Amino acid sequence: MFLPPLQTLILRLRRPLPKTLTRRARISPAMSVNLQTHAFAGNPLRSKLARPAGPCSPGSALETLKSLLAAGADEASSPGFKVLAFRKGRPLARSLEPVSDTPPRWRLGWVPPSKFNDSSVGDFVYLGPGSEGDADTVYWAIDVSSSPSGVGLGGGGDDGLCFVELRTLMVATDWADTHTMGELAIAGHARALLEWHNVSRFCGHCGASTVPIEAGRRKQCTNESCKKRIYPRVDPVVIMLVIDKANDRALLSRQSRFVPRMWSCLAGFIEPGESLEEAVRRETWEETGIEVGEVVYHSSQPWPVGPNSMPCQLMVGFFAYAKSFEIHVDKAELEDAKWHSREDVRNALTFAEYEKAQRTAAFKVNQMCKGVEKGQNFSTDFNVESGELAQMFIPGPFAIAHHLISSWVHEGAPGNTELLPKQLNSVSNL
């Protein structure tokens, strides 16, 4: 797949967090919300995951974990091991009480392996060693959806732990809180790995069952004549903001599953034998009848909150410049698609509304962890509007669509650091 020059990407990904975006900072509604990394990126455990050594290496840590489980170890005998349990795709979380007028903050509900002494070592998935100040700790994930392990966990109430939808935590995350953003990335990585294990129980080559190897980071076919190794795969999805430069407007679309008045970018999966740019042009044409010429890379985002059948998605964001302008919506794919002026989209980008949604979600998580309102689905119960109903709004700062749209809206604005990267056109002009 074609990507811009490596040096340019590295500079973009290493772009420092603006000094004005400190914790609890307020940003003018007219400005773009700039993040150091996208939501679900920047996993702090991955910095040492490539070549961890010593007792924190996958093999050594797995042997130690096996011994602890066999001995029925208690919490005191396993201080260097922390486990994140999942139930039906929901990670275990806890909520910290609010301080002053700030909303509560959530944290992942790490528990010791002693909570899972009746589990097999093969049920655990290695996430990696800790970072600075935590280098001797090894982190794991486990799915307890259909096992007695972790019984009593996540009921909300006295222990303050609850299994919470990852989308809910995503909305509840204060994007200026580096620590919580890191925990969100860890939870996303863990969910993607666990769901991948669930959908790869059989070898795609011979049909035999598979078993986890390398501490759950890989799987292997049990058929002696096959023994094929299976690796987690990423499903790349192109997401594009289609732009009409001559008339200063952008193409936004609606799907039937969207909440009322929400509009977003076009998106679609890449087909075999297709480049990223070709996928952008094909998806735009198939869904809206718009012909695209120049395609420019913006950024990418891991997206582990998709369907369970597609747990490892990577959203690859582009700006796509239209060559035709008459819309013909494919109603099987979209509910509607329309051109929107820059001013109309700017009016939809009101920062206070997204902050309100974040605060509301954070208090909802706090209630759930206290055992309040059990059984209620909070994943879509977030009002992102304040005052009168807006004609439209776009996804919040946790989604790459927000940053594609925001970058275009605030192109050239003083202080905006997310300008359209028009210098990265190279092969995308073909």
Image (cartoon, helix red, strand yellow):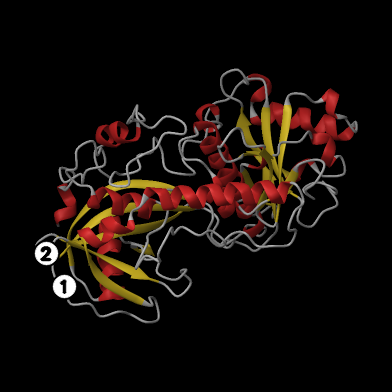
Q: Earlier in the sequence, mark 2 or mark 1?
A: 2
- In the picture, measured across the screen, residue 148 lies left or right of residue 6, that is right
Question: Which is more foreground, mark 2 or mark 1?
Answer: 2
- Residue 385 in the image: x percent, y percent? 44, 59
Secondary structure at badge 1 equals loop
Dot label at residue 325: 1
Query: Dot 2 lies on which element?
Result: loop
Q: Is residue 200 visible?
A: yes
On screen, residue 59 above or below 121: above
* Rendered view: 11 above or below 286: above
Count of numbered circles on the image:
2
Disc 2: which residue:
247
Residue that lies at the very extreme toward the front in this rendered image: 387
Residue 21 appears left or right of 408: right
Q: Kindly report the distance in space between the C-alpha atoms of the residues bearing marks 2 and 1.
A: 10 Å
* Residue plotted at (56% across, 54% down): 167
Q: Nearer the viewer, residue 249 or 135?
A: 249
Residue 314: give its label. Answer: none
Residue at figure coordinates x 65%, y 55% from the top left: 89
Residue 229 shows in this picture: no
Residue at 57 percent of width and 41 percent of height: 103
Crowding around mark 2 (Cα neighbors within 10 Å: few <14, some 14 to 19, many 20+) is few
Query: x%, y% of residue 128?
Result: 61, 32
Q: Position of residue 321 (x, y in %)?
A: 17, 60
Q: Would you call the spot at circle 1 few (<14 residues within 10 Å), some (14-19), or many (20 or more)?
A: some
Pick the quarter of the image with the C terminus. bottom left
- Dots 2 and 1: beta carbons under 8 Å? yes
332 shown above or below 314: below
Give the residue type at disc 1: Phe
